[in-house]
Image: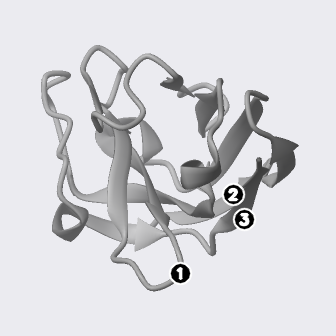
């Protein structure tokens, strides 16, 4: 069982930066792939970035590639999302998630929301123009 708590959201002007953090409980954290997802009003929850168990493999949605960076610190049971050059269209509730399965390989970084079982409560990010 993994419990997740996000922090770091807020209001920022376009072009600004925010760093989201996700603190996880549970001894199996380092064996889970982790992901950041977001959901804007009236839209489906979409994948933003994912990272493999040790950080060797990452995935980014095209819309955030080159602007966002996902990372993790397994010693601190924490995953981060550094968001730079923010745009109004990045406005959404951002969720942290842990994969359904535990992985031995550091090459697995699932992209689909259905592959993630454990979810945080979300943190609001609002980017003003």
Judged by depth in the image, the label closer to the viewer, 2 or 3, is: 3
Which residue sits at x=58%, y=34%? 81
> Which mark, by number, is residue 6?
2
Viewer-proximal residue among 9 and 5: 9
- Residue on which the image places disc 3: 124
On screen, residue 113 above or below 48: below
Q: Measure how far apart labels 1 and 2 are at the Cα level.
A: 19 Å
Neighbour class for label 3 at 10 Å: few (<14), some, many (≥20)?
some
Judged by depth in the image, the label closer to the viewer, 1 or 2, is: 1
Could you tell me which quadrant the N terminus lies in?
bottom left
On screen, residue 55 above or below 61: above
**Residue 30 quadrant:** top left
Earlier residue among tags 3 and 1: 1
Viewer-proximal residue among 75 and 21: 21
Q: Mark 3 falls on what kind of element?
A: strand
Which residue sits at x=17%, y=45%? 110
- Residue on which the image places disc 1: 41
Give x and y (percent) for residue 48. 39, 46
Judged by depth in the image, the label closer to the viewer, 3 or 1, is: 1
Instruction: Left or right? Give the position of 97 relative to 74.
Output: left
Give x and y (percent) for residue 16. 79, 29
Neighbour class for label 1 at 10 Å: few (<14), some, many (≥20)?
few
Q: Do the residues labelled 2 and 3 touch (CB within 8 Å)?
A: no
């Amino acid at each position: 069982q993994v419990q997740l708590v996000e922090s770091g959201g807020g209001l920022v002007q376009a072009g600004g930066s925010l760093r989201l953090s996700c603190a996880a409980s549970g001894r199996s954290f380092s064996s889970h792939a982790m992901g950041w997802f977001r959901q804007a009003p009236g839209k489906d929850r979409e994948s933003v970035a994912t990272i493999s168990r040790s950080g060797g493999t990452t995935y980014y949605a095209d819309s955030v590639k080159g602007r966002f960076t996902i990372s993790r610190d397994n010693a601190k049971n924490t995953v981060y999302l550094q968001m730079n050059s923010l745009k109004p269209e990045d406005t959404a509730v951002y969720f942290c998630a842990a994969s359904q399965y535990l992985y031995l390989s550091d090459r697995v970084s699932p992209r689909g929301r259905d592959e993630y079982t454990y979810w945080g409560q979300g943190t609001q990010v609002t980017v003003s123009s």
